[in-house]
Image (cartoon, grey):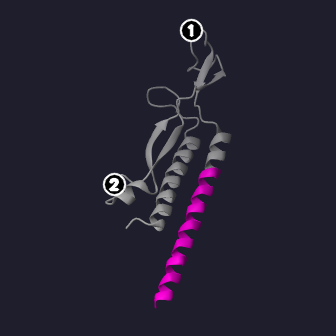
Amino acid sequence: MYGALDISTSGMIAQRTRLAAISANLANKDSINADGTPYRAKRVFFEVGDPAASTQAGRTLGVHVAQVRDDPSQLNRRWDPTNPRAQKDGPNQGYVLESNVDPVVEQVNALEAGRAYEANVVAAEATKAMMAQALRLLA
């Protein structure tokens, strides 16, 4: 059975994944990948439903994480010609490429994901209360 409680649970799982990606972005803001390129922010994309559900209703209700992709936006540049990672030639000579993680944007995204998680918790609690009241009426 895929009901209201499952819908709220799927929302909580999706928002938890989003918060994990935001945390990774903030933690790796100043990191360099093994190939020498700056860390790129990760973005979580949701889709409707649960493709692994056994029922048709389950495949159309709720939400799931469709994919986590690198943010394709331009990397930040910082002028520092003394840095060993500074570009040596071309129009960007003297600039160091840095991560495209913006802490302000990440904080706003974290607040939004946290509020969405809380809304799903409240919906799940309301669903549980309604189910309990229905069982009391039947007894």
Q: In the image, what residue type sits under mark 1?
A: Asp
Q: Is residue 57 above or below residue 18?
A: below
Q: Quadrant of residue 84?
A: top right
Q: Nearer the viewer, mark 2 or mark 1?
A: 2
Q: Which residue is mark 2?
A: 52
Q: In the image, what residue type sits under mark 2?
A: Ala
Q: Which residue is mark 1?
A: 89
Question: Percent from the top left, x then y, of residue 125?
Answer: 55, 72
User: Which class describes the residues within 10 Å of circle 2: few (<14), some (14-19), or many (20+)?
Assistant: few
Residue displayed at 62% across by 43% down: 106
Question: Percent from the top left, x then y, of residue 34?
Answer: 44, 30
User: Hey, which residue is sitting farthest top in the picture?
Assistant: 90
Quadrant showing the N terminus: bottom left
Closest to the observer: 11 or 39?
A: 11
User: Hey, which residue is sitting farthest left in the picture?
Assistant: 54
Q: Is residue 126 magenta?
A: yes
Q: Is residue 72 magenta?
A: no
Q: Are marks 2 and 1 in contact (CB under 8 Å)?
A: no
User: Which class describes the residues within 10 Å of circle 1: few (<14), some (14-19), or many (20+)?
Assistant: few
Question: Percent from the top left, x then y, of residue 61?
Answer: 44, 57
- Whole-Å distance between the Cαs marked 2 and 1? 51 Å
Residue displayed at 51% across by 75% down: 128
Q: Which residues are magenta?
A: 111-139
Q: Using residue 64 as the reference point, say whether residue 27 is left or right of it.
A: right
The dot on residue 103 is none
**SS category of the residue bearing label 2:** loop
